[in-house]
Image: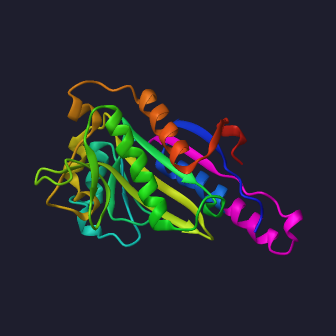
Amino acid sequence: MSEQNKNVQFVDLGLIPYREAWDIQEAILAKTVALKLANRGLSEGLQHVTENLLLFCEHPHVYTLGKSGDASHLLMQEEFLHTIGATFFKTNRGGDITYHGPGQLVGYPIFDLENFFTDIHLYLRMLEEAIIRTCAEYGLRAGRIEGLTGVWIEPESVHSRKICAFGVKASRWISMHGFAFNVSTDLGYFSHIVPCGISERGVTSLSHELGRDIDLNEVKTIVLRQLAELFLFSFTHVSRETLL
């Protein structure tokens, strides 16, 4: 394999429609897959180093359903979506249904995991850990629930509530999709779905738990730092125009 690259190009896309962000991810994935395939015919010293990208963004109101999700977990007719200013997409990520909207930090790591480790289970646990540590910096006790992907406040309690959802895809060890961290999200939009297919637990946000407004840019800085420490990468801020 080619030399491992521990640098990540970081791009803050701001508020961007879901479809547009998905298309960007797919284009980056296709470019990286093509590079890896081209490396197969080259001796080790001539192989090209693959890139890692990390996209942060917010989306306008949208519901997304994972490839193995249950469409009945959208608790309304699609025709009703426009009345609440939302859209709906069936996606190729893992997981069930979730909501994205303003005030939610969405992270899309497009990493060649061969630059880090080839273990999807560990990859998800590392993403979760970054959010758990971020919550801790705000004085919140967050953690995991056995058998359920995600980060929860008071995970051992009957009142546990999800603060961050995850759904990923990997192709030739290249990741896409990622996490949705509720910072100051309008939680009312979750009432129209069975979040992640789990009906017996609630959802929450940083601002709801802390009872105050939270600066999303501050949270972005903390999550980026936590990811860099966990994955042992350095990062470079780049503009959207350099992506493709």
Q: Residue furthest left?
A: 158
Residue 147 at what x, y percent from top left? 28, 68
Is residue 162 shown above or below 72?
Answer: above
Question: What range of the chain is rendered magenta?
Answer: 30-58
Is residue 39 inside the magenta stretch?
A: yes
Residue 134 at what x, y percent from top left? 38, 38
Residue 125 at what x, y percent from top left? 41, 58
Q: Is 204 or 135 nearer to us in this picture? A: 135
Is residue 126 shown above or below 174?
Answer: above
Query: Is 152 left or right of 88, judged from the image as shown?
Result: left
Instruction: Place residue 135 in its image quadrant.
Output: top left
| The N terminus - image quarter | bottom right
Residue 62 at what x, y percent from top left? 37, 49
Whether residue 221 can be seen here: yes
Residue at the image position 84 percent from the left and 64 percent from the top: 47
Q: Is 114 or 51 nearer to us in this picture? A: 114
Whether residue 61 can be seen here: no
